[in-house]
Image: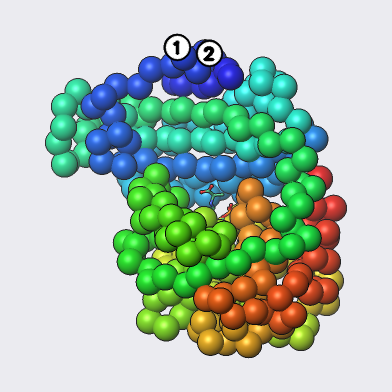
């Protein structure tokens, strides 16, 4: 693989980042994951806007313009011959030359790293025809989940709890209400209504979420942004998650209870189809 590091395109074995980088020592950095379908970046403008916001919320300077981010992503796609897959982009606060809790001054420039992950047939994921099973776990993450930081230890632990329970993923629950999935936004469906948590610092403002809710409204589905409980989710007709890597993915079981028929219903597969059609 050819990866990007601080302005250079290098074989992955030659790319280097300092041991003092604050991303490595403090998880002091942010990231974006953009999907690629048929060589085309999906919703890249949205990812650029969120990246700029994440950086600004952490008082980091945005090292590139949107046009430069786009050119770099396109170059990585081309150099690695990616048809379907993901681009991972990470910006950390850089290397102050030592370990210190306080942020370094403006002379320390951010470290930028990006790489591709080929996923042939990403949009034809056979899991979408079956759906995924999830468990609920307490949401003990920090209070600024709207910033897409690289601090992913608890979400990783959540995935491991799901694995141990023999299911696919976990939904976080805080004060009785579902916040989101370990790496995706969470939704339930009642009749023609799609229910999902409103945007706040409790969840990541998914780029896929924004598009999905827009397309749902255009398709005469009703979007209700409000809190919902695990109990309500178990009683729902359908449920799903959304993210740049899963797009729209049915959820058919929660904490061992079947949702709806225990198979993907009507609305969610249709929404997935609409999303993929519109974005491709
Ligand atoms: N995860 N919520 C969380 C906690 C996430 O980590 C993500 C994305 C989302 C969905 O956001 P978007 O639709 O912009 O991908 C929601 C990415 C895909 C990841 O960490 O791999």
Q: Is residue 7 left or right of residue 16?
A: right
Q: Is residue 111 above or below residue 245?
A: above
Say if residue 208 shows up in the picture: yes
In the image, residue 45 lies at what x, y percent? 64, 44
The residue that appears at 65% across and 68% down in the rendered structure is 251
Determine if the C-beta at disc 2 is less than 8 A from ligand 1: no
Q: In which quadrant of the rendered image does the N terminus lie?
A: top right
Q: Is residue 98 left or right of residue 82?
A: left
- Occupied quadrant, residue 263: bottom right
Say if residue 204 shows up in the picture: no
In the image, residue 275 lies at what x, y percent? 78, 57
253 or 232, nearer to the observer: 253
Tell me if mark 1 has few (under 14), some (14-19) or many (20+) residues whose alpha carbon lies within 10 angstroms of its own: few
The residue that appears at 37% across and 35% down in the rendered structure is 92
- Occupied quadrant, residue 30: top left
**Circle 1 sits on which residue?**
14
In the image, residue 276 lies at what x, y percent? 80, 53
The residue that appears at 55% across and 67% down in the rendered structure is 134
Residue 208, which numbered label? none
The residue that appears at 56% across and 42% down in the rendered structure is 33
Q: Is residue 9 above or below residue 28?
A: above
Q: How many marks?
A: 2
- Occupied quadrant, residue 42: top right
Q: In which quadrant of the rendered image does the C terminus lie?
A: top right
Tell me if mark 2 has few (under 14), some (14-19) or many (20+) residues whose alpha carbon lies within 10 angstroms of its own: few
Q: Secondary structure at mark 1?
A: loop
Q: Secondary structure at mark 2?
A: strand
Real-space CA distance between mark 2 and mark 1, rounded to the nearest whole angstrom: 5 Å
In the image, residue 66 lies at what x, y percent? 58, 35
For the rendered model, the colour scheme is rainbow
**Circle 2 sits on which residue?**
11
Q: Are marks 2 and 1 in contact (CB under 8 Å)?
A: yes
């Amino acid at each position: 693989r050819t990866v990007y590091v601080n302005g250079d395109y290098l074989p992955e074995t030659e790319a280097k980042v300092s041991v003092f980088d604050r991303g490595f020592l403090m998880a002091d950095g942010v990231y974006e994951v953009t999907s690629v379908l048929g060589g085309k970046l999906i919703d890249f403008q949205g990812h650029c806007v969120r990246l700029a916001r994440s950086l600004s919320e952490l008082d980091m300077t945005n090292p590139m313009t949107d046009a430069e981010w786009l050119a770099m992503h396109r170059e990585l796609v081309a150099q690695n011959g990616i048809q379907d897959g993901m681009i991972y982009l990470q910006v950390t606060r850089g290397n102050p030359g030592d370990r210190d809790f306080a942020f370094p001054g403006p002379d320390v420039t951010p470290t930028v790293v990006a790489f591709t992950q080929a996923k042939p047939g990403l949009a034809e994921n056979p899991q979408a025809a079956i759906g995924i099973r999830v468990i609920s776990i307490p949401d003990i993450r920090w209070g600024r989940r709207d910033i897409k930081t690289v601090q992913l230890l608890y979400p990783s632990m959540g995935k491991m709890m799901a694995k141990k329970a023999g299911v696919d993923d976990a939904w976080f629950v805080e004060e009785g209400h579902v916040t989101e999935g370990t790496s995706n936004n969470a939704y339930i469906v009642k009749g023609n209504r799609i229910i999902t948590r409103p945007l706040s610092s409790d969840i990541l403002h998914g780029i896929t979420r924004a598009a999905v809710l827009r397309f749902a409204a255009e398709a005469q589905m009703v979007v209700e942004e409000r809190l919902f409980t695990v109990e309500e989710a178990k009683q729902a007709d359908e449920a799903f998650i959304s993210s740049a890597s899963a797009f729209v993915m049915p959820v058919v079981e929660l904490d061992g209870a079947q949702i709806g028929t225990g198979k993907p219903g009507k609305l969610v597969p249709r929404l997935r189809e609409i999303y993929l059609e519109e974005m491709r």
